[in-house]
Each structure stands twice: as structure tokens, then as C-alpha cells.
Image (cartoon, rainbow, N blue to C red):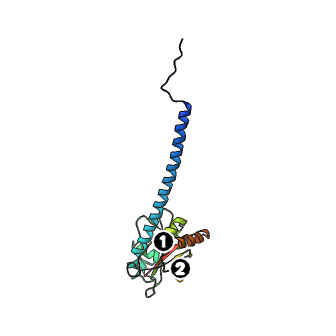
């Protein structure tokens, strides 16, 4: 009597090997997906901030404090931009503790501060609640020149746009400077970027 073995099946060791390979590939895949999502959030934040500045520039030239937003006077330049629909699509307008602001789907908060006509810096746009990577990307982006886009300078870490006016840096940030300044600001809980324009 001869024993016959089924030669079509897989051994337990072969199955464990396959499972190990699948596990390694899935961990690598999750890591890649996570990096792609983070890069998408960074790019979206950069696009939103530059788009807000571009849309606010022509409106800022005509804005006067107390201009009407419907039947009532605007309390801020951010509210005025909302009333004039001069902000990027995909942002939600909200008033939190009496402060008007925009929020995107990445939970980044944007606002604008008007400095008054006749000043060298006409308005400041801000992004808050940034990740350190977002801060570094925004700090090293090219926003143009005073002649082309009206860009006058950047501040990293100030609490608000009016505070940032006193310390706008007109130089383009190097990667090293951005890493240092964003690291300091983010560790202090002020992971904010402010851009001045005229």
C-alpha cells in the first residue's frame, strides 16, 4: 500500500513567507500614501495663501475701515474680503470669538489685516495652525517682487498680522533659515506665517 501525498497545496512555511512579504509591502505603501497626503496638504496651503493674497490685492486698494458689508460696517479686512467674495474656493468663512477668519479643509486658518492706504505695506495675509513642514514650504516659496506681485516681506511666528508689520523680512528665506525660524516658532506654539503686500 503506497501513501499518496497531495503535491498541489502550499506548505505553511510558504504561506508565512507570502504573508511576510505582503506585510512589508503594505507598511511601505502606507508610508508612501502618508507622504503623498502631507505633500498635498502643503501644496494646497501654499496655493490658498498665494491665492488669498492675489485676490485681496485689488480689493485692498479700495478698502477703508468702516466700509459697508451689506447693511453693517465691516469689522475687519477679512470680513470685507468675505463680503466681496475675494478669497479662494474651498475655504469656509467663520467668526470665532469675534474674529473673522477663513479655514480650509486642512484646518489651516487664514486672515488678512489692512494697514491703511499710503503705507508701504498695504495689507498682510496670514496662515495659522501650520505644521512645521507647511511653515518651511511657505517660508521658502517665491512670492514675487514689489513690482510684480506687491510682495513686501515675510514674518514667521508673530501672533497677528498687525504685530508682523513691525518685523517683516524682505529677504527670501533659505532652507536653513526657514527650518530654524519655523522650528522655533512651531515649538513655541506660534506656527504662523504672515506675508506683507502693497
Quadrant containing the N terminus in the rendered view: top right
Estimate the x, y position of residue 93 in percent, counting from the top left. Answer: 46, 68
Question: Which mark sits nearer the N-terminus, 2 or 1?
Answer: 1
Residue 106, visible in the rendered structure? yes
Q: Secondary structure at mark 2?
A: helix
Asked which secondary structure carries label 1, the reply is: helix
Say whether residue 157 is left or right of residue 153.
right
Circles 2 and 1, Cβ within 8 Å, touching? The answer is: no
Q: CA distance from mark 2 to mark 1?
A: 17 Å
Q: How far from the left and from the top, in percent, is residue 47?
A: 42, 67
Give the image location of residue 15, x and y in percent.
53, 34
Q: Residue furthest front?
A: 2
Q: Which residue is mark 1?
A: 140
Going 56% across and 31% down the picture, which residue do you hit?
Answer: 12
Q: Using the image as rendered, state which of residue 33 and residue 162 is in the foreground.
A: 33
Q: Which residue is mark 2?
A: 164
Decide: few, some or many residues near mark 2? Use Cα within 10 Å; few <14, some 14-19, many ≥20.
Answer: many
Amino acid at each position: 500500500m503506497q501513501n499518496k501525498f497531495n503535491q498541489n497545496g502550499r506548505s505553511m512555511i510558504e504561506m508565512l513567507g507570502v504573508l511576510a512579504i505582503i506585510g512589508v509591502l503594505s507598511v511601505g505603501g502606507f508610508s508612501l500614501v502618508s507622504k503623498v497626503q502631507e505633500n498635498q496638504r502643503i501644496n494646497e496651503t501654499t496655493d490658498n495663501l498665494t491665492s488669498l493674497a492675489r485676490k485681496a490685492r485689488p480689493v485692498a486698494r479700495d478698502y477703508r475701515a468702516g466700509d459697508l458689508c451689506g447693511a453693517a460696517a465691516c469689522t475687519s479686512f477679512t470680513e470685507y474680503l468675505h463680503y466681496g467674495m475675494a478669497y479662494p474656493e474651498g475655504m469656509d468663512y467663520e467668526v470665532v470669538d469675534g474674529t473673522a477668519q477663513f479655514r480650509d479643509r486642512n484646518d489651516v486658518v487664514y486672515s488678512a489685516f489692512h494697514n491703511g492706504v499710503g503705507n508701504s505695506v498695504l495689507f498682510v495675509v496670514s496662515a495659522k495652525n501650520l505644521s512645521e513642514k507647511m511653515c518651511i514650504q511657505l517660508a521658502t516659496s517665491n512670492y514675487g517682487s514689489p513690482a510684480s506681485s506687491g510682495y513686501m516681506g515675510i514674518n514667521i511666528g508673530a501672533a497677528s498680522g498687525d504685530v508682523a508689520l513691525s518685523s517683516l523680512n524682505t529677504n527670501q528665506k533659505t532652507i536653513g533659515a526657514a527650518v530654524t525660524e519655523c522650528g522655533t516658532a512651531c515649538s513655541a506654539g506660534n506656527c504662523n506665517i504672515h506675508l506683507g503686500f502693497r
